[in-house]
């Protein structure tokens, strides 16, 4: 995959930086002409001869080592590579690839037919890749020295280009790696007799060994018996298993914060040192864990770790639920571990053993940390709490934890009860029991109601952030294409200042309307000035978040700071959003009916809108038809409705609050409609207010659905298309939309930043 990506990047570089590459080739050729002829006169042909002799020498080496299959695969791969290069050269001569052909070849006067890629060099790279020279430094040095001298000679002579050489070598290596992956490699793993011999060399006299299946580790596991009858648990780490799971761990490292994810040990030595360190540190902390008896090599590519076998039953194998006493023992062992600054980080049911004498044994502590930070200690507690809740239920798990750990410390664990922070098997089990984590959080927060719990962000990058980033780039590209057709400075200069002032005033009223609407759905008293500033601060937050996400999160935080519980704050904001959505749809139907009845204009949306709506309908029907889709919709909608409906019933019993909530939501939508209408008037356009209302309501709905900051791109396209369909000239429609977005989206941002920082200093956010 990396080789294919590299080939693509080199091809792009050849197209984009053609001038730079051509200049570099000319400089190299000029420098070659100035150098003494003897400098490359002898080494160049010698290097070419070496490139002919090396494959023969490697073939003889493979035969002497009794590896004819590997040699046959290498020769076959070379033939395949030559065929690939010949086909690539033929394709590069097509008119469609003329630019790439020119970038890979050197043009000479009177020479019309040159070869872009060197087939022999690519075949040699594939041949050597299949044979595999790892661990053979002398052969590697000889090969790359010959390739380097040969490449320098033909570059100085002006017979090829740097990009051509790079692509040929990378193409050959990529084909070779593909063949190695498809054909496989002979196993270099040590046999059981070799493993026993390695253990015997350090004084562990093993008489029998039996392969066992251990789901906890990706390495090979054996049950060994010594001559005195003592049993050992043997783990074998092979070189080809060294990077097992590395891609997944790399993904976790990129996505999660530094203390949350574990690093990617890509060396056998690193893995051995970590396992030994954690084993010794756990034992030193007076926590029972299988004693590490030996760490020994078994050949050049494998290592063996031998542990004393502890008999007993893991919690995963336990018949029935563990007793309260056993739960207390488990918590005690983990707390002793934490007292020494050590974590386990994989406290799953199959790694917690109840020994025959009743003691608790923590198995396989190699995932843990030494000198652990406070966050890592809390993550360990969160993992154990979630795992025990899967075994005995949230109530018993919380009661045992509160008795051993204490409410004050466990409250800080509540924000860490996130699936992304837990071990992989625990996350998989929680997908089938989605009610456990919310129940645990509720019990922990209820145990210390007066404590303030700050949310903890464990992720560096969230998937929705990546989606928002990609969508934002695409939207910015679309918007840039629009702005290329309109001069924003000219739009502002030619706009009627009276209508512009009116649009600005109405834009400012939207924040007052939003503050009134939010206050109406909160039974508690809110200060209007701070609520107004919070809505203004939301304009800054939506600059970097999707339109429907950032403002809601900020309002929830603002209500929590004003004394509302998280559940009430979420319910109040959810109720305000539900009512705003219902009013939005009702107004759209009303204005569309009025516009259609008057037959003023045919507001026919562009064709792409129908495709988008059809796609959304298909996705919705597919979600309803499939059981996973219904489960997902239920999981998303039911908790929201359970929170919102009681809040709506409470507000309905207070006519004053209900009027404020409904009136504010209605005034907010109408203010945006008036702002868009004033922007149209400011640029010399003239449309009925009903047509402007339909255009705004449709465009803002599409913008809210778009995963871009503030609906960037989607709103502009939808509004300009709607105004054009309503009868405005295309340039006037686009200019009006840009003025509208300037007044309602871009201009408030600096004021929102000031309001955001002011509220933070006042601890209102």
Image (tube, rainbow, N blue to C red):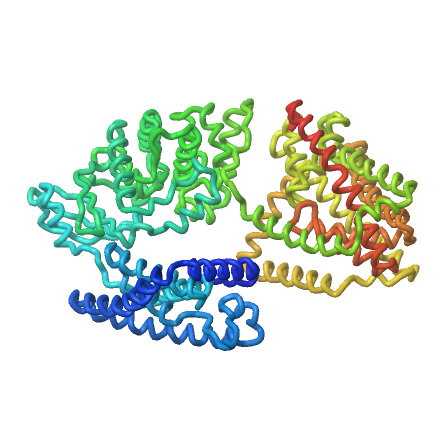
Tell which of 59 and 310 is nearer to you: 59
* Percent position of residue 360, x then y: 27, 34
* Percent position of residue 339, x then y: 34, 25
**Rendered image quadrant of residue 258:** top left
Which residue is most to the left? 227
Residue 182 visible in image: no
Q: Which quadrant would the C terminus be assigned to in this image? A: top right
**Rendered image quadrant of residue 286:** top left
Residue 735 visible in image: yes
Q: Which quadrant would the N terminus be assigned to in this image? A: bottom left
Q: Is residue 541 above or below residue 221?
A: above
Say how many tags the image has: 0
* Percent position of residue 341, x then y: 35, 27
- Image check: 496 left or right of 516? right
- Image check: 712 left or right of 398? right
At 38% from the left edge and 74% from the top edge, which residue is drawn? 82
At 40% from the left edge and 58% from the top edge, which residue is drawn? 35
Q: Is residue 39 above or below residue 321?
A: below
* Percent position of residue 623, x then y: 59, 59
């Amino acid at each position: 995959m990396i080789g294919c990506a590299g080939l693509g990047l080199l091809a792009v570089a050849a197209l984009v930086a053609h001038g730079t590459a051509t200049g570099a080739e000319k400089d190299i050729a000029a420098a070659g002409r100035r150098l003494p002829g003897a400098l490359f006169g002898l080494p160049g042909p010698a290097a070419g001869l070496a490139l002919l002799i090396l494959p023969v020498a490697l073939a003889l080496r493979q035969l002497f080592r009794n590896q004819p299959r590997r040699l046959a695969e290498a020769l076959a791969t070379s033939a395949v590579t030559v065929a690939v290069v010949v086909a690539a050269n033929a394709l590069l001569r097509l008119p469609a690839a003329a630019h790439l052909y020119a970038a890979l070849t050197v043009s000479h006067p009177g020479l019309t037919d040159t070869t872009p890629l060197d087939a022999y060099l690519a075949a040699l790279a594939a041949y050597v890749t299949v044979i595999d020279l790892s661990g053979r430094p002398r052969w590697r040095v000889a090969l790359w020295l010959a390739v380097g001298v040969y490449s320098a000679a033909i570059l100085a002579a002006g017979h090829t280009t740097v990009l051509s050489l790079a692509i040929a070598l990378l193409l050959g290596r990529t084909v070779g790696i593909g063949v190695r992956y498809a054909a496989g490699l002979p196993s270099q793993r040590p046999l059981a007799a070799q493993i026993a011999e390695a253990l015997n060399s350090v004084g562990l006299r093993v008489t029998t060994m039996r392969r066992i299946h251990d789901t906890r580790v990706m390495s090979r596991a054996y049950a060994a018996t010594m001559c005195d009858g003592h049993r050992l648990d043997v783990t074998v780490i092979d070189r080809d298993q060294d990077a097992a799971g590395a891609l997944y761990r790399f993904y976790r490292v990129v996505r999660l914060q530094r203390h949350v994810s574990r690093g990617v040990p890509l060396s056998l030595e690193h893995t051995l040192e970590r396992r030994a360190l954690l084993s010794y540190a756990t034992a030193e902390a007076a926590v029972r864990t299988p004693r590490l008896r030996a760490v020994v090599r078994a050949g050049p590519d494998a290592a063996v770790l031998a542990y004393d076998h502890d008999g007993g039953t893991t919690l995963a194998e336990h018949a029935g639920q563990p007793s309260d006493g056993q739960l207390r023992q488990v918590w005690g062992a983990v707390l002793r571990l934490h007292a020494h600054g050590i974590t386990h980080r994989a406290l799953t049911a199959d790694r917690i053993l109840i020994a025959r004498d009743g003691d608790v044994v923590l198995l396989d502590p190699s995932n843990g940390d030494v000198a652990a930070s406070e966050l890592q200690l809390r993550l360990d507690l969160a993992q154990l709490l979630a795992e025990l809740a899967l075994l005995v239920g949230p109530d018993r798990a919380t009661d045992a934890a509160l008795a051993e750990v204490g409410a004050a410390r466990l409250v800080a664990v509540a924000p860490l009860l996130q699936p992304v922070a837990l071990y992989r098997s625990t996350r998989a089990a929680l997908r089938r029991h989605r009610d456990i984590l919310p129940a645990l959080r509720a019990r922990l927060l209820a145990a210390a109601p007066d404590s303030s719990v700050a949310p903890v962000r464990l992720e560096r990058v969230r998937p929705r952030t990546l989606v928002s980033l990609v969508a934002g780039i695409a939207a910015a590209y679309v918007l840039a294409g629009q702005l290329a057709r309109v001069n924003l400075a000219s739009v502002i200069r030619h706009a009627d200042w009276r209508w512009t002032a009116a649009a600005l005033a109405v834009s400012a009223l939207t924040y007052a309307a939003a503050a009134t609407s939010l206050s109406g759905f909160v039974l508690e008293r809110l200060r209007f000035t701070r609520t107004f500033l919070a809505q203004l601060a939301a304009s800054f937050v939506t600059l970097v978040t999707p339109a429907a996400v950032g403002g809601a999160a900020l309002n929830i935080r603002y209500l929590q700071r004003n004394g509302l519980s998280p559940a009430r704050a979420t319910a109040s904001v959810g109720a305000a959003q539900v009512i705003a959505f219902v009013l939005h749809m009702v107004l759209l139907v009303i204005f569309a009916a009025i516009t259609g009845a008057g037959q003023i204009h045919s507001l026919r949306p562009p064709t792409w809108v129908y495709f988008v709506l059809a796609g959304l309908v298909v996705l919705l029907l597919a979600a309803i038809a499939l059981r996973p889709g219904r489960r997902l919709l239920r999981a998303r909608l039911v908790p929201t409705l359970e929170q919102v409906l009681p809040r709506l019933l409470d507000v309905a019993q207070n006519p004053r609050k209900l009027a404020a909530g409904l009136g504010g939501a209605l005034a907010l939508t109408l203010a945006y409609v008036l702002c868009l209408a004033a922007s149209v008037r400011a640029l010399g356009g003239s449309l009925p207010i009903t047509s402007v209302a339909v255009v705004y309501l449709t465009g803002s709905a599409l913008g809210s659905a778009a995963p871009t900051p503030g609906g960037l791109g989607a709103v502009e396209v939808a509004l300009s298309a709607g105004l054009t369909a309503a009868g405005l000239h295309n340039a006037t429609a686009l200019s009006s939309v840009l003025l509208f977005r300037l007044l309602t989206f871009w201009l408030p941002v600096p004021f929102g930043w000031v309001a955001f920082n002011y509220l933070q200093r006042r601890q209102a956010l």
